[in-house]
Amino acid sequence: MGVKASVVVFGDLKTALRNGGEPDKAAAEAVIRAVRPGCAVEAAEDSDLADDIYPADGFAYVAVLPEATIVCDREIDVDAVLEFAAGRPVVVFQQHSGDGSFGFTEWSADGAEVRSEDDYEAADAIAREVFGFTAETVSSDLVVHGFRITRPDQAERDAAMAAAVAAMVAQGPTRMRMAPDGSLVPIED
């Protein structure tokens, strides 16, 4: 499964986690509606940060605490995030060990970019510095409120995916064998 994370943080998450408190569900819904404009939003089952720091497709998870807000969402709209930030520092952090991708950008409360990084090797160090944990060591103590997100173009996206799958199925399976030089070559039936 690997290491995966896709989060936005407004405010000081380390302090928020240290001070604790119950996340505000009504505020969480307001946040997800603000950072996913135009999308249909429905309440889903709540979870914890460790389980949904990289949520399933079509879901987002939010915790609003006094010192910080954390949004776990695989489709982050940076423009909407920065507009919503309104005078708070913001961090966008995305990590995926499967393809070795990593993206991190930090903005100050006045909206100025502080730093940006895309070197996968820096991911854990940055996560520890900014959040106090890594995607692998995140605590399951923080409740995140769940939301099902439906994009305005979801029907078209689903139809395109179904067409692509149908085209692959129509081609039939391709069996391969290893050639003497180690390359893969199709098996002729």
Image (cartoon, rainbow, N blue to C red):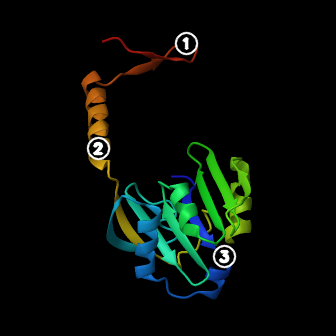
Measure the C-alpha gap from mark 3 to mark 2: 37 Å
Amino acid type assigned to the residue bearing label 2 in the image: Asp
Measure the C-alpha gap from mark 2 to mark 1: 42 Å
Amino acid type assigned to the residue bearing label 1 in the image: Pro
* Left or right for 48, reference 173: right
Can residue 80 be seen from the camera position used here?
yes
Answer with the quarter of the image where residue 123 lies: bottom right
Query: In the rendering, at what x and y percent does residue 39 appear?
Result: 35, 59
Query: In the rendering, at what x and y percent does residue 143 appear?
Result: 48, 78
Query: In the rendering, at what x and y percent does residue 60 appear?
Result: 43, 64
Query: In the rendering, at what x and y percent does residue 58 appear?
Result: 37, 57
First of labels 2, 1 by sequence position: 2
Can residue 47 be seen from the camera position used here?
no
Q: Vertically, is 2 above or below 50?
A: above
Q: Are marks 1 and 3 in contact (CB under 8 Å)?
A: no
Q: Which mark is residue 12?
A: 3
Q: Vertically, is 95 above or below 9?
A: above
1 vs 3, front mark: 3
Closer-to-camera residue (89/175) = 89
2 vs 1, front mark: 2
Q: Are marks 3 and 2 in contact (CB under 8 Å)?
A: no
Q: Secondary structure at mark 3?
A: loop
Amino acid type assigned to the residue bearing label 3 in the image: Asp
Judging by the rendered image, the residue that carries numbered circle 1 is 180
Q: Vertically, is 116 above or below 70?
A: above
Judging by the rendered image, the residue that carries numbered circle 2 is 158
Q: Secondary structure at mark 1?
A: loop
Quarter of the image containing the C terminus?
top left
